[in-house]
Amino acid sequence: MSLQSVLERLKLVEPRASVNYAAGAIAPMQSRPSYDLSGTYLPSSLFKVPQRQDLQLLRQLRELVPLLDMAIVWLRLLIGEPCIEADEPLKSDIEQFLEGLQVNRVQEGACNWLQTHIDNALLYGRAHAEVLLTNRRDEVFGLVEVAPLTTALHPHPDGYHMDVVQYANLGEPTVLDANRLITTVLDVRGDDPNGTSLLFGIPFIAEIWSKIVRNLGASWDRYGVPSLYVTWKQPENFNDPQGAITNAVMGGVRGQLNTIAVDRANGKTQDLTLAGDFTIGVLGAQGEVMEFPMTSQALMEQICSKTRIPPFIFGLQWATTERMSTSQAILLNEVIESYQAALTPALMKFLTLRQAIVGRPGDFKLSWEHTSLQDRMEEARADWMDAQGTQIDIENQQALTRLGVFTIEEMAQHFRPELEGLTPAEVRSRLPELVAELPEAPAPPPPGAQQGMPPRGPAGPTGEGMRGIEELLGNGNGKH
């Protein structure tokens, strides 16, 4: 859709009567989608594209399984937010607009809306946001995320596009204005325009996991706080044919146990007082609790493989050397970049619309920060190796200076490029605290000693090992 047609739909400019954009946008189609091979959907305004996913079930699964909720949270954090690439005046204008944008009725800032938008897209497969204009229609006021559970897709009369409709309890559905709607659809499979949720394929695994957790809770209800039983050994020649005395005695014991349980629930303690030969035991304490960790891990491994997030990010340490491998980092980075690519067109549409409304169009594009965790680890490792190389260079220069190959002023010029070409006197004037001579070189480590480790020796405060530790602690840098 052209910018002219967008402005016409927003009533910002007068429409061109000579051109019918709705009729001339697309020629009639011959093929039909799988959800309406009979071609009968157009006459009915209540027809909606069938939703093959149970959206209510997806929301309940997220509430039920903490791992699924954290997967979506972590992915939206890793996706991040885009940066504006443009000339400085235009870049500053767009960034200030995004920072002050009213979103979701109670928030401010486009970054807060984007988190909600990504969350809905991952959970339901598609997400929509309505653009709100000011009363004068000369600026974008805000963005409001549309609840996916209340929306459906209705085929447009041109046979190709889809209208997003919102169904109410009564009356005709409301067709949301496509020009003021930001839509993101993830993982379209076949010709289903509803997209696919990140949790697709997980309900069966999640149902098994929930049953295990539910049964584990029931086991703890039974064995964690066990019930007590009381037996009374009646005295010899005890005669109670009707059981009245026995009921009275046992009723008193039962009343005391109930009182003790209530007091303990309220943080109080009481003792049990009995007169006679009574035995109190635990009912069902000899039962065995069903195995949980291994079965739960097998199911959570399936969930982690579906979300493509390494388990240690969730805090699951299933191996003693659990860490992100290079292949895992590459695959996760590909997943993040695919989500960023799916979000970019909707964001570009929104920003282009805003710039057209305010009359400040310009050339800009969106870029996303590289999110490879493996790259960040390699950068940290490279910085560490650079620091090691600098330390070795310093030690080599000091050794050559002690041998007379370089002077102290020349060594200073080696590490301070801005001193190059100066005479020794000028170097001294620039560096008034430069030493006159280098200190003596430290003694070499004993034969067989490892770098940064004390030499092995007899255990105890008088052994060589303790003296090695004292030498290491003398200068505090782990070198002799």
Image (cartoon, rainbow, N blue to C red):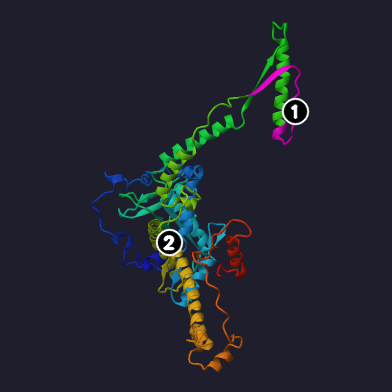
Q: Nearer the viewer, residue 20 or 101?
A: 101
Most extreme residue toward the left is 30
Q: Where does label 2 land, which residue?
A: 374
Is residue 11 shown to the viewer in this render? no
Quadrant location, the C terminus: bottom right
- The kind of residue on which mark 2 rests is Gln
Count the marks: how many? 2
| x, y percent for residue 360 | 45, 74
The residue at 41%/64% (across/down) is 349
Circle 1 packing at 10 Å, graded few (<14), some (14-19), many (20+), is: few
**Magenta segment: does it hold 316?**
no
The residue at 72%/29% (across/down) is 260
Q: Name above or below for residue 66 compared with residue 410.
A: above
| x, y percent for residue 437 | 57, 85
Quadrant location, the N terminus: bottom left
Q: Which mark is residue 271?
A: 1
Q: Name above or below for residue 347 compared with residue 251.
A: below
| x, y percent for residue 307 | 42, 50
Q: Is residue 131 left or right of residue 276?
A: left
Q: Name above or below for residue 214 compared with residue 8.
A: above
Is residue 347 shown to the viewer in this render? yes
Secondary structure under tag 1 reads loop
Q: Name above or below for residue 216 compared with residue 419.
A: above
Q: Nearer the viewer, residue 443 or 287?
A: 443
**Magenta segment: does it hold 267?**
yes
| x, y percent for residue 219 | 54, 31
- The kind of residue on which mark 1 rests is Asp
The mark nearer the N terminus, 2 or 1, is 1
The magenta span reads 263-281
Asked if the residues shown at circle 2 and circle 1 are in contact, with their CB atoms under 8 angstroms apart, the answer is: no
Secondary structure under tag 2 reads helix
